[in-house]
Amino acid sequence: MKTTKFDCIIVGVGGQGSIFASRVLGEAAVREGYDVISAETHGMAQRGGTVEVHVRIGSSFGPLIPLRSADALVGIEPAECLRFARYLSPKGTVIINTAPVTAASLDYPPVENLVKALRDTCERVIAYDAAQLALDAGHPQTLNVVMLGTLSRMLPLTALEDVVAEHVPRKALDANIRAFKLGQRIFDGDLVISTRTGLASSR
Amino acid sequence: MLVVADDPGCFSSQNEQDSRRYAQFAKIPCLDPSTPQEAYDFAKYAFALSELFEIPVMLRPTTRVSHARASVTLSGSYSDQRSAHFEKDPRRWVMVPTHARQRHVELNRIQPLLRAELVSLNSLTLKRSHFGVVTAGVAAKYVEEALKKLRLEASVLRIAAYPTNHDQIATLVSNSRQLLVVEELEPVIEEQVNALAGTVEVCGKLTGHVQREGELTVDTVLSSIGQTVGRFAIADVPAALIAAEHTLPPRPPVLCAGCPHRATFYALKKVFAKEAIYVGDIGCYTLGVSQGTIDTTLCMGASISMGSGFSAACDKQIVSVIGDSTFIHTGVPGLINAVYNGARLTLVIMDNGTTAMTGHQPHPCTGVTATGACTVPTPMEDLIKAIGVQGLYVVDPYNLFETEDALTKAKNSDGVQVVIARRPCIISTKKAGTLAKAKKCVTATCQNYFASCKLCSTLFCPAISYSETSALIAEDCVGCGVCEQICEFDAIKTA
Ligand code: SF4
Ligand code: SF4
């Protein structure tokens, strides 16, 4: 049985802005009068490890989302996305960036396989090259905001874009707003990304 | 108020200790919040409680309370304008045996008063059910959610403060036939419930119904309740998903590209080889374990004190590895001991000018206080010299030749030799905007030699990866130039 209004998991690797995304989300929810609780898990070092954040909107419980309960799973990094897919509810939505963060030491499986595993087991998967959209928006670091944009279409919140605008550095404001809107258009389905070039074009 | 955050699951700790045991041992009250809101409320209350009983109060959150963010309702700021004043009272403040005996009587006298005072923090909800749960901390929230998911009626006693109140436990016992105790870490409450339970069945960690180690979650609580009352709601994760998860590579934390520690470890391994015993400490440099240059990690300062022990007990080369902030925190007494008692070891202080792992806090050698004010910096070299070490070298770890040279000299000398490898943390450098933008790239020559080479892979820099024919240098290279010094074919050049 459902115990909260909206449960969301945001995962990525250190430096991709998972924690920033969760804070913005939490603050937008607080502003609209919801009780919010979130918890982050990351490794010992400053950079490069897995970062997992649970955000519960309209919840009076603990911060950890039970298995198979999250309404949305935002995977800023594809392998990390699959790693936490067991938290997604059978009715939940996956939003996955298809651009991996890998290293020589990682035996990284093909991204198509990761997306396929998600499609096979999750009801709804929105997969796209969000890193490319971030570049299109004007800055690679807007990756997390692109994905927040896509997520925003599923949320019971209206203040998210404003809260993003308040929290990004001034000089990066325009790029972030562009990124947010590009992410929204992905959800709306009026932006197609060529699988060949990775470039987005309007439908 | 003493705040101790316990870490079930060891997310960033060396052990899963339960500080409630220490509160019990010291006979001080301990408050156990289950949410950030309670942590806030209890912190305020702790000061009042401490004043009332003239006793320190422990606030003990666990990981999911301390590493959580939540909407919190504030209740006005707490400020105390009184200036501190000390009343001389030797019987109260000078703990010689005659006074200490009296204070012990006093400490015992207030225990029942504390129990009575703290009772209002706990909550007891009695239901018409034979099943009761006793719980505490964040686990109380998991219990609430699990019972809701199961639509199960149960009486619940939620303990929020210690020493626990026996009357509440007794009331629950008399209302129930079966009890489940759900708490993180040690069975502190369970032991007390057991003592009062009589013939009522008590399930918990001691009976195997609740896991003994690691972190609890709603799911583990669901399974504990299921095992106890036979009502289950176990999440069923599709087998295909579990199979797919197994194809994922683990992503262990790594030192940053351009981290000066990596260069120091490289030099260490070259000079001291595999045979030396590398005694480590607490910091980012614990990750040197993947480079084969950390053999032990226990607690802050242990690199030097354990190193002294190794040097007394065996005739291997001993290398103690510690960071600057840990050295100043707990390394100094160990160094005094090592020198005074004639240890033979090389101490490498990896001085990156900050406390990197916990988020770049300043420490006494930086000349900045925790509030950001400037102060007198503790002179590291003068301090070390004053202790009387036999050799002291200061090197730049980005300069491999210089670093290896100093380490070799240290290795071949007697007594305690100290090598300070000094270079700011790469994150501080980036934040300060002083990173020289000299990115490296691999030139065509790498392709000719690559198949038999891969020498730079021994550095483990995450910015270096390999294609079929050549090394590749990624965007996150900071241009430290260490790989360039390692490459024997001049294949790596500044872009
Ligand atoms: S944060 Fe600093 S000390 Fe830690 S791994 Fe990165 S560069 Fe090294
Ligand atoms: S110069 Fe070499 S070792 Fe240094 S960060 Fe770049 S790739 Fe890594």
Image (cartoon, rainbow, N blue to C red):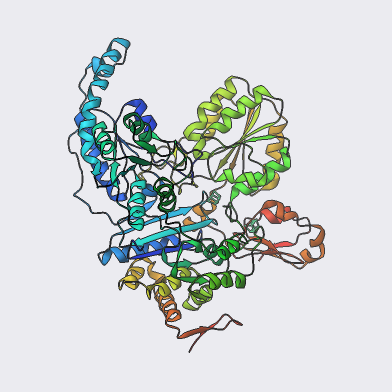
Q: Residue at x 78, y 55 (%)?
A: B488
**Horizontal and vertical percent position of residue B27:** 31, 26
In the image, farthest residue toward the top: B98
Query: Quarter of the picture for ligand 2?
Result: bottom right
The quarter of the picture where residue B169 lies is: top left
Q: Is residue B74 above or below residue B14?
A: below
Residue B352, x across and y down, in percent: 54, 45
Quadrant in the rendering for residue B275: top right
Measured from the top left, where is residue A77 in percent x and y? 53, 66
**Quadrant of the frame with the C terminus of chain B:** bottom right
Is residue A40 found left or right of B48 in the rendered image? right
- Residue A184 relative to residue B407: left or right: left
Residue furthest bottom as drawn: A203
The answer to whether residue B359 is left or right of residue B239 is: left
Q: Does residue B293 appear anywhere in the picture?
A: yes
Instruction: Quadrant for residue B477, please give it.
Output: bottom right
Q: Nearer the viewer, residue B292 or A94?
A: A94
Position of the N terminus of chain B by quadrant = top left
Residue A99 visible in the current orientation: no
Residue at x 57%, y 41% (from the top left corner): B350
- Front-lying residue, A134 or B396: A134
Question: Looking at the image, which residue is at 40% across and 64% down?
Answer: A8
Residue B75 in picture, x, y percent from top left: 19, 50
In this rendering, the count of numbered labels is: 0
